Image (cartoon, grey):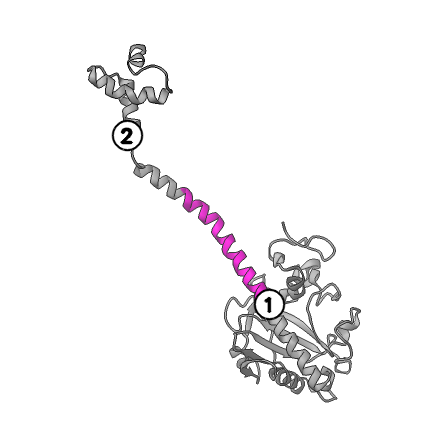
Amino acid sequence: MLKLYEQLGGGGDYLSLFRGILPSCKKQKKCYTSDMQYHKILNKNGFTLAEVLITLGVIGVVAALTLPSVVSNYKEREYIAKLKKSYSIISQAFTAAIADYGTVDNWCERPLNRDQCARNLRDTIAKYLVVGEKCSGGVTMHKKCMQLYYKSDLGDKTILTNDSAHSLITTDGIGYEIIAVAGDGYDNNWCKTTVNDLTIGGFYYNCGYLYVDITGPNKPNIIGKDVFVFKIFQDGLRPGGIPADTVWTESFKDQCLGANNYGTTKAWCAGWVIMNDNMDYWHCKDLDWNGKKKCK
C-alpha cells in the first residue's frame, strides 16, 4: 500500500489515494478484497426496495399522527373567521335598524306576543341584510335556514329552535334565528336594558336571543363549532358567555366548559371565540377569563 501511495505521487488527501487504488491494482493484476468492496460502495446508485418501503412507512406514520391535528386546526380557524364575520354583519344591521326605527323595545307591541315580536325583529333586521330566504311557521320550516337538531359535545342532539322563533339565511349561507324573550322568561321584564349593562340586569331584562349558524343548515351542526348565541338588547347585540354573563345558564364556565356538572351548551362560547380568537375550550377545561386563555 505504501508503494502504491508513492506511485500515486504521495501527498494529497486520502480520498485521492483511494480513488487511485482501483486503476492501479487492476493494472498490477493485484486487487484485494477491501479494494473491491470500496469499488462497490463507490459505484452504488439509488435505494433498495426495502429502503424505499421503510421510508414510505415512516412518512405514513408521521402523516397519520399529524394530519388530523392540522385539519382540525384549519377548520377551527375557518369557523372563528366566519363567526367574527357574521357578528360584524349582524351588528351593523342592528345598528342601522336602530338608527331608522328606534331601539329594539319599540319594534314590538305590549303586552308581548313572543311569536309576533320575533317575526318583527327578524323582518326589521332583514332589511339590512342580503337575504336568501326567511323561515317561519315552526320547527319543520326552519330547516331551510337553520338545522333542526344540533349535536352537543356529549354527542346528544338538541333542538335550538321553537315555534315562536323566526329565522333567515343570507346569500352567503349564514343562518340567523331570533327568539324574543327576556332571560328570566317573564314578559314584563322584556327589553329594559342596554348592551353596557354588565350587572345581573343583563340577564333579567334583555330583549331576546339571536342564534347564529355560520354554515346554515349544513354540517357540522355542532354547538360551539358552527352555532353560537348572542344576546339582544335595546341598543344592539352582545356575544353570549362574556365575563358579565354569570348566571349558570349563560356563563362560559358552566355552559362552555361544563363546570359544576351542568349540561354543556357551547353556544355560550361565542364571547370567548370573539375576544380570545380561539376554540381551545374543545381541548382543555382549565381556561379562565381571568387566567389561562389558551391550552398551550
The residue to which callout 1 is attached is: 83
Give the extent of the magenta segment.
Answer: 58-84
Q: Dividing the picture into quarters, in which one does residue 46 lie?
A: top left
Residue 174: horizontal and vertical position, in percent? 55, 74
* Closer to the camera in the image, 243 or 170: 170
Compared to residue 156, the image places residue 49 above or below, namely above
Give the main secondary structure, helix, strand or loop, of the magenta stretch: helix
Determine crowd level at label 1: few under 14, some 14-19, many 20+ residues with C-alpha closer than 10 A: many
The residue to which callout 2 is attached is: 43
Q: Secondary structure at mark 2?
A: loop
Between the residue at mark 2 and the residue at mark 1, the CA separation in whole angstroms equals 61 Å
* Closer to the camera in the image, 58 or 153: 58
Q: Say if mark 2 contacts mark 1, CB within 8 Å.
A: no
Residue 20: horizontal and vertical position, in percent? 29, 20
Compared to residue 275, the image places residue 124 above or below, namely below
In magenta stretch: residue 77: yes
Front position among marks 2 and 1: 2
Which of the labelled discs sits on residue 50, or is there none? none
Kind of residue at disc 2: Asn
* Closer to the camera in the image, 37 or 24: 24
Residue 166: horizontal and vertical position, in percent? 60, 82
Say which quadrant the N terminus sits in: top left
Kind of residue at disc 1: Leu
Q: Dividing the picture into quarters, in which one does residue 11 lie?
A: top left
Residue under the point 52% across and 58% down: 74
Residue 5: horizontal and vertical position, in percent? 31, 14
